[in-house]
Image (spheres, helix red, strand yellow):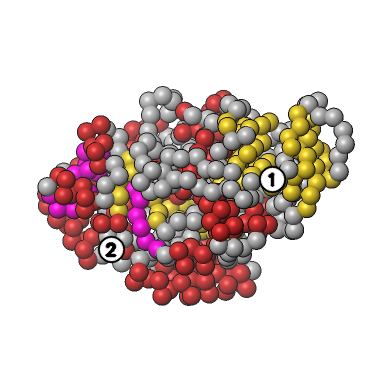
Amino acid sequence: MSSMLIKNGRIIDGTGAAGFSADLLVKDGKIAAIGTIDQPADKVIDAAGLVVAPGFIDTHSHSDLDVLLRPQVLPKIMQGITTELLGQDGVSMAPLPTQYISSWRKNLAGLDGDTEQIDWTYETTENYLKMIEAAKPGLNEMYLVPHGNIRMEAMGLDNRLPTEEEIEKMKAITRREMEAGAMGLSTGLIYIPCAYSESREIIEMCKVVAEYDGVFVIHQRSEADTILDSMKEVIEIGRKSGVKVHWSHFKVCGKQNWDKIDAVLELLDEAKKEGITVSFDQYPYVAGSTMMGAILPPWVHDGGTNKAVERLADPELRKKMVHDMENGIPGWDNFVDFAGFENIYVTSVKTEKNADAVGLSIVELAEKRGVDPYTAAFDLLMEEENAVGMVDFYGTEEHVKRFMMRPEMNACTDGLLCPGKPHPRLYGSFVRILGKYVREEKLMSLEEGVHKMTGKPASVLSLKDRGTLTVGNWADITIFDPETVIDKGTFTDPIQFPEGIAYVIVNGEVAVDHGKHTGALNGQVVRHKKS
């Protein structure tokens, strides 16, 4: 029986309750005792002056492919994250019918990257999760079944509504993947093919998810001009399906929409009064990040990435794209409108040919190429076959703080692990909250900050044995210095591990020791269990 004793630390247990001084004993991967403990152990950690907290839980992660290639997932574990939720935005790894592998890899590349180093013929969530287990992940991995993958298996990638038979097929696929252990369903209604759907097909799938007490995680249809209608759509899905609703990366984009924030929060309050379970996650920055293909009108992607690349090569269709991007399409979030080319930066590309674009805004890239910004963006997306990442600046610190203080909020990274210059949230979201917003700005207590990273996300996902320091729970533990913990990455130099994370323990094994990774790979695939 292996044992570990953590002595002299300040226990902040993840529930939001006041911290207290105590020792903590770990045996066989689980928390065995908390209190004054005077007994020998195989390993002793002196946590004097440090906080002993539950391991952090990232409810919006894009390590889906990277965990198979680099299973330590260093950007996460080094900031204290011990559990993450994959399968986001309705666009992920599984299910993946073999006939769509080529097209889907291109669609996925801007979010999760691409590689020839894995066998892409796994087909189902069950087989994908077995691949993660075989890779021996460094942290605990959970999975949402993505709406776009379900839709692709049921009806392909075309821009049309499903037949009744196809809706039934989507429900059957959802049930199969929930049985395989998915935590719930995700969608991204700005991404293809999810954007082609109406509420009804989502409601029908969510009814299945609700049977399993799973969660519905949504990148809503609009975070900008039509955000109020978008919020109402999401709430209606929750109302009609009975599913628990969780908004991804909650925000309001664009200066012209900041006056909608009060109304957005009122809708949350009204939904809760009605009895709908609502929550959201947030990364603590004023800029977002996604695949650059999202700047294109939805019709460009009709039929998949290969069709989009063909359209980008057509001068007449480029004119139509420019028209739609300058004039808008009802219900479509137009990144160029709410952020502007000057505030959209290239973070990753696939080929060496365009490596010089990484780190430049679209305006800077256009100047470098000697073309207008539209041409620069279209050429880049065409040449890279849509495998381009971006950062876009959309908000203010005041708004970040206002959303952070909401009781529905828990922390996330939403970090893209593609090569290049990723958004600094990948390396710093959780420690930024502890250092900047808790210690420096005193926006909330340390106990509340830790709760929003641990107990709160655990409750959203119905995790019974993680998220709090409770006897019997798995020993996922992060030990940090509350006086020094801080993020180090910037938008110009993002790939920097944080300061102040002393130890990280995953299922009872030390993965970070004195701020250095030990090489431990002791994570588990956490499958949802029907309540």
Disc on res. 50 = 1
**What's the residue at 64%, 37% (across, down)?**
503
Q: Is residue 377 magenta?
A: yes
Left of 470 or right of it: where is 424?
A: left
Query: Callout 2 environment at 10 Å: few (<14), some (14 to 19), or many (20+)?
Result: some
The residue where tag 2 is placed is 337
**What's the residue at 47%, 66% (across, down)?**
399
- Which of 238/136 is in front? 136
* Residue numbers of the magenta segment: 371-395
Kind of residue sitting beneath label 1:
Leu
- Which of 175/430 is in front? 430
Q: Is residue 380 magenta?
A: yes
Where is residue 427 shown, x and y percent of the image?
48, 43
Where is residue 364 shown, x and y percent of the image?
21, 50
Callout 1: SS: loop
Where is residue 124 shown, x and y percent of the image?
50, 34
- Picture quarter containing residue 529? top right
Where is residue 140 shown, x and y percent of the image?
61, 37
Using the rendered image of the protein, determine whether residue 178 is visible from the camera's viewpoint.
no
